[in-house]
Image: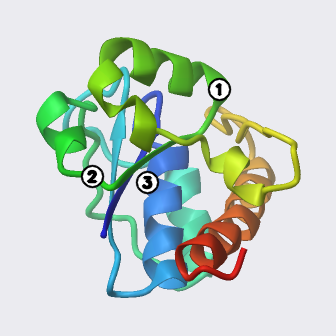
Amino acid sequence: MRIVFVCTGNTCRSPMAEGLAREILGADIQVESAGLAAWEGKPATAQAVQVLKEKGIDLTSHQARLARREILASADWIIPMTGAHEVQLKGAFPEFAAKIKRLGRWAGNGKEQDIPDPWGGSVERYRRCAEDMEALLHKVKATLEGRH
């Protein structure tokens, strides 16, 4: 199975989700990330690198990339961080609509929470973002394992 996490610039949320998912979901699931307005080659933010380093995850080699058709085509799931990202992805890539599901929808509690953008914020803001994503990624894992 292959999952692509998508945010705006591919320097904060989606690379953090990718790193966290690699740990939470395990080696059987290939995880990647991309951004809807990414500046190709840009590294993850210093705060994202620091917060994941605190969790034993190395983001130092991350390079941002644009969410292009060829990246998304082979994904089993495309997981955007917000409703706005979801709408934009479905508009740009309608052929992939059935496999686009916002991270906050995996909770299965009727709430469709967005993952707020920590860009420009404090390390603590990034920590909260990572904690929110971790909780939801455990829901993704349970769903994929049929334990929802």
Q: Residues within 10 Å of mark 1 (few under 14, many from 20)?
A: some
Q: Earlier in the sequence, mark 3 or mark 1?
A: 3
Q: Label 3 vs label 2: CA separation?
A: 16 Å
Tag 2 secondary structure: loop
Question: Three-letter amino acid code at disc 2?
Answer: Ala
Position of residue 69 in the picture relative to residue 34 (left or right): left
Helix, strand, or loop for circle 1? helix
From the top left corner, tell me how far across and down residue 21 is, in percent: 50, 71
Q: Which amino acid lies under the numbered mark 3 shown in the image of this protein?
A: Pro
Task: Compute the Cα span from label 3 to label 1.
Answer: 18 Å
Circle nearer the N terminus (1, 2): 2
- Give the image location of residue 144, x and y in percent: 53, 73
Q: Position of residue 115 (x, y in %)?
A: 70, 41
Place residue 50 in its image quadrant: bottom right
Tell me the residue that label 3 is attached to.
15
- Earlier sequence position, callout 3 versus callout 2: 3
Residue position for label 1: 83
* Quadrant the N terminus occupies: bottom left
Against 4, is 18 above or below? below
Residue 82 against residue 75 in the figure, above or below: above
Other-residue count near label 2 (Cα within 10 Å), few / some / many at <14 / 14–19 / ≥20: many
Residue under the image location 60 percent in, 19 percent down: 84
Q: Amino acid at mark 1?
A: Gly
In this picture, residue 16 sits left or right of residue 55: left
The answer to whether residue 92 is above or below residue 31 is above
Comparing labels 3 and 1, the label whose residue is closer to the camera: 1
Residue 148, quarter of picture: bottom right
Q: Residue drawn 62% across and 71% down? A: 143
The way the protein has been coloured in the rendering is rainbow
- In this figure, which residue is indicated by the disc labeled 2? 75
